[in-house]
Amino acid sequence: MSRSSRRRPLVAIAAALLSAALVAGDAFAQDRAPQRFGFGRAATAAEIKGWDIDVRADDGLGLPPGKGTVAAGEKLYQEQCASCHGEFGEGNGRWPELIGGEKTLRSEDPRKTVASFWPYAPGIFDYVRRTMPFAAPQSLSDDDTYSIVAYLLNINDLLPADATLDAAALKAIRMPNRDGFVQGDPRPDVPVGEPCMSKCRKEPPRITSDLAQRLGVTPDNRRQK
Amino acid sequence: MNERTNSGGRRRFLARAGLVGGAALAGGLPPVRALAKGEENLPPNVPEWMRTLGPGVTASPYGTPSPFEKAVVRRSVEWLTATEQSSINFTPLHALEGIITPSGLCFERHHGGVPEIDPEQHRLMIHGMVERPLLFTMDDILRFPSVSRIYFVECPANGGMEWKGAQMDGVQFTHGMVHCCEWTGVKLSTLLAEAGVSPSAKWILAEGADAAAMTRSIPLEKALDDCLVCYAQNGERIRPENGYPLRLIVPGWEGNVNIKWLRRIKLGDRPWHHREETSKYTDLMPDGKARQFTFLMEANSVITSPCPEKPMKHGKGFHEIRGIAWSGSGKIRRVDVSTDGGDNWRTAELQEPVLSKALTRFRLPWTWDGAPALLQARAIDESGYVQPTIEQLRKSRGLNSIYHKNSIHTWRVNADGTVNNVQII
């Protein structure tokens, strides 16, 4: 064994000890989760533009450029919407009606439609663009969407028949039920009191509704499909 | 085994298994006694499934329930909606035990059908009022520290068909818009920190990658509190109908905000007032005004045995009353059960573990005297909230709310042991 080779293990051991100390000191720091991981990558402007389809309903933020007319909207509506919603928005079976319902919200049979219930006109644009036509969502151009929204507003007496609709015009429309919503959850709102455990009833229980078994609207779930 | 030949060995093996003619008798098994049909497998006979070999391992690479459980399925109510793509079905609560809902039985609510999403091509975008708009692949999401929690998810329309009276004669349809699973994912707060939330941001908009491009606004405070962006349900990847490959879990809040197929989160300073938070999922009050952003699912409970689907065929005697309770406000503290229409109550035993914002199983021993009975359960959660009666709920909110009907439910046990849904005052 040469002198150098005899010396080498000592050097190696010292180096190993040194690096072990360094590693031990670092190891825990490295294992802690960082404040930012840096996973994922920056979304490009083009990527965001393609997916950023939302319109904020109360102020129309996000409404795209473009415009449409009631006349063009009527044609598109008859082609793409009427089979479900009816020629005049009256609905079809359980498919939703889009007109009428004014002054029904306090009745036994409230009808929630564009005219009677929707608070903000730009919300109609958002919904039609993201979901309609039902079987081909996001297939309408922005101009066509403006046109269909114009027609919906027209059949609800909220836009003249000769009107052109763009972002500014849509934002300017005040919906009849604009003030029909209350924010700020008031619950718990049902006074119940302390839960009673014995002799809680003043009168014996009286059945107020027992139609369920006779209505015949419950699917049979006791047999195989 | 017979060593002489392979075929001999095989023959003997089959003989033992009773597959070779005459082998059963030769093997000394007792003769099958002629009994009434349906009793061939009862003692003292040896059941037929002990006389043959069953399928081997991997005969069913992904296991399914016994064919004898075929009736235990999600079911829809056909007359409720115009199309199955925008519809709902119901969890068969009457057939389930414990607190975990099997993934394949979790109720479904879709607004544009179930998208078939290739996870390789799925992306989550976070943008709006952030320092760094980001785009994540599924692999990126999976690299973040993970967390698993057991939470219920409940559609706020659960029980909505019962506001005006008892309508559905089965617990699957009166209460089946709820499920409870173990969800695994990354904290939404972790992802938002990655993008850097602007100090002015107050709300997020979550959007799904389905044909409805479902959106809901959620307060940033909740997003940073306990929301999860999940990729796993009950230990495996989320089922397509429950949001594969990525969904939002918003613990204790109405099901609709738990956006499935999550593709985009935008931050803003105000809510978006989209269709599903104005025209739908708002609670119409008697004065014609609608409550908006009523996110919390208040405490609820229901007895699942007995129930219309599980009548007390056994006649009078012992019956363990079983049911589930849950609250979006936290843990269930107590469940009381009445068998006399709310005159007297006994406190039920809660099955541990009792978890926050999860289903809790309760049980109460009961000796039925054979007389008609009115069964009720009443949940109390750790906030002190007491589940109201249907009359109390109606008095406060009228009949047109549709959503958030969480009143004490009544089953009538008839003298013949059948059970019906009724409402009482």
Image (spheres, rainbow, N blue to C red):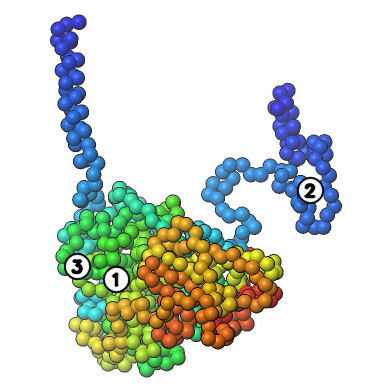
Q: CA distance from mark 1 to mark 2?
A: 64 Å
For residue B168, side relative to residue A143 (left or right): right
- Residue drawn at x 22%, y 73% as measured from the top left: B270
In the rendered image, residue B57, in percent from the top left (x then y), is placed at 58, 42
Mark 2 — on which chain does it sit?
B
Q: Are marks 3 and 2 in contact (CB under 8 Å)?
A: no
Instruction: Give the mark, 3 or 1, whose residue is nearer the N terminus.
Output: 3
Question: Considering depth in this image, is A135 or B7 the residue closer to the camera?
Answer: B7
Q: Are marks 1 and 2 on the same chain?
A: yes
Q: Residue B201 bears which disc, if any?
A: 3
In the rendered image, residue B394, in percent from the top left (x then y), is placed at 44, 85
For residue B320, side relative to residue A49 (left or right): right
Identify residue for label 1: B217
Q: Dot 3: what SS?
A: loop
Instruction: Give the mark, 1 or 2, whose residue is nearer the N terminus.
Output: 2
Identify residue for label 2: B45
